[in-house]
Amino acid sequence: MLSTSLTVGDKPYVITAVVTLCGHDAVIAVGGGEAPHVGAAALASSRPSLEQNGGISATASVLCVMGHKDDLLARDAAMRLASRLNTTVLVSVGLHVDQATKEDIRQLQVNFEQLIGQIESWLRQQK
């Protein structure tokens, strides 16, 4: 197995991912903000697109810790990576900023999207 760690942003919006290749599959743990944790996990598997256009899509299952709102980030990231890389991807996400404002959440989302882009690039380089 091959692993790397990637980080985007500055405190309190810093987000770090540990990415591990398991054969062709990927396991990604993302944590950030003031209190990294496990808030949600999504497992996505690639499959032929239902549009029957020869493209690749994905399907996902999600688990979320009660009271956490990391499930959409985990699902979107797992689906994106699984379909673009045609593989199985597990993404765990836990981001937290105390008393988060809409701007705090927006900045975490921006950093998260940038981090997922870096993860995708790293995974492509490993193929």
Image (cartoon, helix red, strand yellow):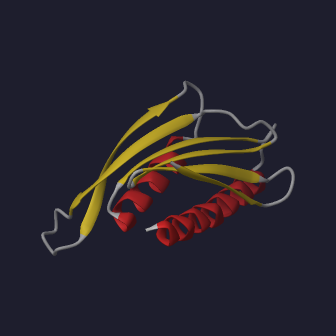
User: Image quarter for residue 97?
Assistant: top right
In the rendering, at what x and y percent does residue 48 appear?
Answer: 19, 62
User: Image quarter for residue 119?
Assistant: bottom right
Q: In the displayed orientation, state which residue is furthest to the right.
A: 11
Direction from residue 121 to residue 15 in the image, left or right: right
In the rendering, at what x and y percent does residue 21 appear?
Answer: 49, 52
Q: In the displayed orientation, state which residue is furthest to the bottom.
A: 53
Q: Residue at (73%, 52%) from the top-left corner?
A: 15
Say if 86 sits above or below 88 in the image: below
In the rendering, at what x and y percent does residue 3 appear?
Answer: 59, 51
Q: In the displayed orientation, state which residue is furthest to the top.
A: 66
The C terminus is located in which quarter? bottom left
* Count of marks, rendered view: 0
Direction from residue 38 to residue 43 in the image, left or right: left
Q: In the displayed orientation, state which residue is furthest to the left.
A: 52
In the rendering, at what x and y percent does residue 39 appear?
Answer: 59, 34
User: Image quarter for residue 49?
Assistant: bottom left
Say if 25 sits above or below 122 in the image: above
Q: Residue at (73%, 38%) from the top-left corner?
A: 36
Direction from residue 53 to residue 93 in the image, left or right: right
Q: Residue at (64%, 62%) from the top-left corner?
A: 115
